[in-house]
Amino acid sequence: MSTRRDFLKQGGAVAGTLALGGALHTAGASAVPGVSSQAPAMDAVIRELLMESLNAAKSGGASYADARIGRYLQNFVVTREQQITNVVDTDSIGIGVRALVNGAWGFAASRDLTKAGVAAAAREAVAIARANGIAKDRSVQLAPAPSVGDVTWRSAYEVDPWTIPIEEKADLLLRANAEGMKAANVKFVFAGFFFRKMERNYANTDGSVIAQTVIQSAVQQQFTAVSPDFSDFQNRGNTLPPVARGWEWVRQQDLVNNSRRWGEEASEKLKAKPVEVGRYNLVLHPSHLWLTIHESIAHPTELDRAMGYEANYAGTSFVAPPEQFLGKFRYGPDFMNVQGDRSQPGALGTIGYDDEGVAPDEFLIIRNGVVNDYQTTREQAPWLDAWYKSQGRPTRSHGCSYADNWSSVQFQRMPNVSLLPGDNDRTWDDMIAATDSGIAIVGDGSFSIDQQRYNAQFGGQLFYEVKGGKITGMLKDVAYQMRTPDFWNAMDMIGGRRGYEVWGSFFDGKGQPGQVNAVSHGSVPARFRNINVINTGRKA
Amino acid sequence: MRRSNITEVLSAPNRLLESAAAQSGAILSREEAQALIQRVVAMSKADGIDVQIGGGYSSNVRFADNQMSTAGAITDFNVAVQSWFGNKHAVVQTNEISDAALRAAVDKSERLAKLAPDDPEAMPMLGQQAHRQVDAWFPSVASMTAEDRARIALTALEPARGAPDLRAAGFLINNAGATALGNSKGLFAYHRATNANFTLTVRTTDGTGSGWAGAEHNDAAKVDFAGVSRRAIEKARLSRNPVAVEPGRYTVIFEPQAVGDICQLIGFYANARATDEGRSPFVKQGGGSKIGEKIMDERISIYADPFDPNILAQPFDGDGLPLGRQVFIENGTLKTLYYSRFWAQKKGVQPTGAPTSFLMSGGTASVDEMIRSTERGILVTRLWYLREVDPRTILYTGLTRDGTFLVENGKVTKAVKNFRFNDSPLFMLNNLEMMGRPVRLAGTEAGGAVVVPPLKVRDFNFTSLSDAV
């Protein structure tokens, strides 16, 4: 099994060509055992390579540079019904160097972790930055960020999934699959574990030296029920949120017993009543609402999008230009508060320090229903200087810089963006009981939103008819269409802390070349009045 | 958000290898690749071993808001090994190629394979296959410098900066890489390719107009960078001040990019096993598949062909099966679906191989002719954020983007607000009116090599309006 000790051994094989191998083997004493809460210190060879690359960038003329040496491990165990279809382990290590020369960026990444290799990557980053000088117009300015010194951090896992034998992982999935298939008409189950481990080492020319370890875990399941006459099939998926936790979290999910329930839900969908189109009150569960928050609040309040930096791919934002929205635009009711943070334990956006050495803070993106801030990096924070001054707040990055791999350049990615609980005790059940008529939606399904984040359409996993404060049956073929500000201003009831849950995805795309970010969004259940619902069922 | 269902996990190993190939660094020659694979095979103590390698150099420049943004170059190399003990197997991938690291990867895959349960669907290893080569390597891409890339950015930045009303955001990416696979039974396949892709979005400073254009080819000399800039600028200005038109069913002229965005999706559902299991849009009422039935307009043929000069795709799939021209829909009739090696054996047919390209037949009509023949309709540049709504019918939702226009009495009369649609490519290709000449796209939302024509169809279902520009 892969542990830090293996990393150091493999690193030794590489660095051996540098005659630095000796240092590695003694550093191997800092190995992380299966259960630990210690953040491992940065390996001495890694540190030396980071410094070598920064020195090469500086001597090449960079006014600022940062370097990241990362090792990215992935483990998949994939099954269907009673068979293992794949067992995959991947391992990638390399360096990415970013250099600012005469106000223009350059980036280079290489898997060659020798002194010569990292220096060459730094020189290529400098050369690219210099070449871009011919096309430069405005110079990049970075918000000041004090050196955080020499620090370490690790995410909230207890048991490293790489210490769990493959048989144990496979056995759990196959037992869960068997249980799900006990439900009537459930003929197929696809299920897999997906684990990620990231050993992220960072240094910049401001003097920060940071070693961080992150573990993330996901269970992906899909239960498929097929009607006996082959006239219909229905899926139940997205059963559990991915998290920044370890195997201990998997053990807590009661996967086998819950799979029976999820299978039965797939089966029940075959008998569900098609929805009639019209306007409905919607009661949305956190397992569903997280995705609506993601698409209609988190993306449009990315400052790079608002400023046009994603125009050619992910799109721009209706929350622009910022000066017309900050402190002015009503996104939703007074009780709506949306927080950006990278601090909720177990959430996928949580980190000690971002990919330009900034310790992230907690900030309100929507405050009492009004736009209050955007997600920022060091390059972006100065664009909001006037707003921060008017509020008596410092101009600083919120720590949203992220690269999905050593080979990717860091840019602004979303922190955890969460709908904060209301000042009450309401739970999901309380909100159903308080609703005379409507549709309750559990789980995320189909999702689509335009490039400025106005017009969206969302499906779900399970749709329930609500009448007289009670769930009266299951519906199918439900999707709602919305215009973002209208939708959030139609929110008339929000849950309290007891109903707060964090959901998310491993797969959020942005940037060119495309990068994939893992995201988490906390949410309480909430109710929305009079939302347009369509029926999506057709005949092929 | 990207699509994130179970198929992501199921296809993850292949995707990883593809992304490895796209990033890459050390670009091995055929002989070097063969030697490396033989080196790894010689390390194996298992019953059998598969080896896949991918490496290359990827360089890019990005700009937005008329400014240079990020620019980079990535060198990487990946080796994936799959060890077999009877019907047990496991894959380990690494980007280290020292003997020690490769040996560690082989050992680990053997350890994992021994622990894995038997795979009842395991297929015997392929021996050597007859692979035809595709010549997809062009020095125009492989030798492009950082300054060359910055100058290409200037083909868009200079006209945009020189105009009072325009903001340009664009991206150039060049890839040069090689992939190879082999095994302990003598299989070996190798493919080397370059690719240049340039896309550009020009927006107007009043915030009401946005135009997109893109181009791609394996040979940068065949990419008209200045032409992309001209088209995006023209579209941006034409699309200003859009008016709202009632959603509903319209005759729609889809430019090739929009056709590719929605029609390519058919490929993801054309799976024989899913169909035989009753969970696909190609299930016949009462069970069985619709193979042999007419399922769309008879002018439509859909096929894969890595040798098409517009495509130059990898001529073998991840199993090492040679890929040739494979017709899935011929003159509107479903001819075959994708058969994996396992499912083909079970059903007593030949495996099709997993396609690396998507092509559609064409006609002779130009987009101008389609406009001239239209009394009232919508002209669509591209589609965006397409997501499955109902897998039973390939019903998708998504939006128009970056240039949507009203056509009245044979002329483009005004820019219109973007629409959301809820429709299926299967329905759309049954409502065909006219077809144009197929062209290669600059990538679709789903990615991959796509060659499709512009189409005019009737009764396409726009369900709501978007204020997005």
Image (tube, rainbow, N blue to C red):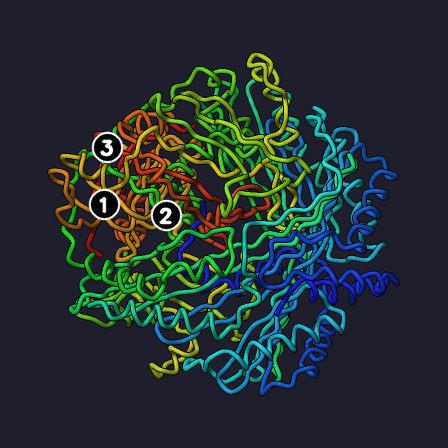
* Pointers 3 and 1 within a single chain: yes
Left or right side of B33 for A346? left
- Depth check, mark 1 against mark 2: the one in front is 1
Residue B93 image-quadrant placement: bottom right
Report helix, strand or loop for mark 2: strand
Q: Vertically, is B349 above or below A127?
A: below
Mark 3 or mark 1: which comes first in sequence? 1
Q: Which residue is mark 1?
A: A478
Residue B123 position, x and y percent, is 46, 82
CA gap between label 3 and label 1 equals 12 Å
Which amino acid lies under the numbered mark 1 shown in the image of this protein? Val
Residue B313 position, x and y percent, is 56, 62
Front residue of this view, candidates B196 and A38: A38
Q: Which residue is mark 2?
A: B387
Residue at 53% in and 68% down: A164
Residue at 49% in and 85% down: B124
- What crowding class fits label 1: few (fewer than 14 Cα within 10 Å), some (14-19), or many (20 or more)? many
Q: Which mark is residue A531?
A: 3
Q: Which mark is residue B109?
A: none
